Amino acid sequence: MLDKTVKKIIEKSKSLGWILEPDAKALMKSRGFDIPDSILTSSFKEADQFLTHSKGPVVAKAVSKKILHKTEHQAVVTGIFSSDHLKNEMERLQKLVGCENILVEEMVQGIEIIIGAKNDFQFGPVIVFGIGGTSVEIYNDTAVRMAPLSPDDVLPMVNSLKAKEIISGYRGKTGVNMEALTHLLVNFSQFVMEHENDIESIDLNPVMCTKDQCVIVDARIMLQPS
C-alpha cells in the first residue's frame, strides 16, 4: 500500500511522466535512504546562506520539467566554493528552458556506484547495480538480478563486477561500507516491488559510497504510462 508521501508525489507527477529530482529524493528519504543536505530555492540569498553553512563545496542543479537529462543541458554545476561563483551559475541556470528552481546541495565525495530498476515486461522488476557516474554507459560493468533482493544476493553481485576491487578496496584505498550498501540495495528492491504498478524505471546515479555510508546524489524516476 502506498504511503501518503509516495502517493502524493506520484499523483502530482503523472501528467509529466517522470518525477522531478527534488521529489524523487524525497521519496528516497521517506524510505530511510541517505540524500545530501540541500535547499530548493530561486533566491540567491537563501542559496548563499546554505553555502555559508555548508562544510564544503556545493552543487547547483536546474529543476525544470523540460530537462530530464541535466548533463546534456549543462544543468549541473559542481565544486562551488564562493558566493560569486554561486551567483553566476544560478543566473545561468535560471535561464535554461523551463527552470523553476535551483536545487543547491552539499557536494558528497565517495566511490560512485549506480543502482537502478526497470519493470521488465516478461520478468517484472529487475535491479541493476554497478560502477556509477557518466562512465557507466561506456564500461557497462553492471550486475542484474530480479527483485526483490535478499542480503545474500549483494556480495555475489559485487563479486561479479570487473571493477569489484573499487568497491571492496584495493592498494590501501578504503572500500565501501558493505552493511550500508546491502541495506540500500535490499530496501530499494523492496520499494521497487511495492510500487511496480506506478514506476517504470529508477536510476540512482551516482550513489556516493564511503566506509561510512551510501548517499543518493542523483535520482531519476520514470512513471508507468497512464
Image (cartoon, helix red, strand yellow):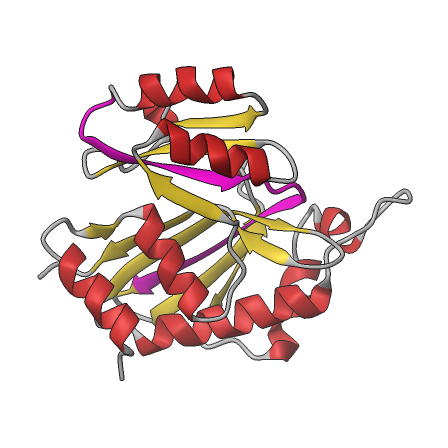
Expressed as whole percent of the image width and height from the top left, the position of residue 102 reads 34, 34
Q: Nearer the viewer, residue 187 or 59?
A: 59
Residue at position x 26%, y 64% in the image: 199
Q: Is residue 138 left or right of residue 94?
A: right
Q: Quadrant of the N terminus?
A: bottom left
| Residue 89 magenta | no
Q: Is residue 55 left or right of residue 143?
A: right
Q: Which segment is the magenta one?
A: 96-119
Residue at position x 52%, y 75% in the image: 149
Please say whether residue 121 is visible from this viewpoint: yes
Q: Is residue 188 above or below residue 132?
A: below
Q: Quadrant of the C terminus?
A: bottom left
Expressed as whole percent of the image width and height from the top left, the position of residue 194 reads 33, 78
Considering every residue shown, the one lying at the far bottom of the view is 1
Magenta residues, dominant SS class: strand
Q: Is residue 211 left or right of residue 135?
A: right
Expressed as whole percent of the image width and height from the top left, the position of residue 184 reads 56, 67
Quarter of the view holding residue 25: bottom left
Expressed as whole percent of the image width and height from the top left, the position of residue 11 reads 15, 64
Q: Nearer the viewer, residue 89 or 151?
A: 89
Residue at position x 65%, y 66% in the image: 180
Residue at position x 17%, y 55% in the image: 13
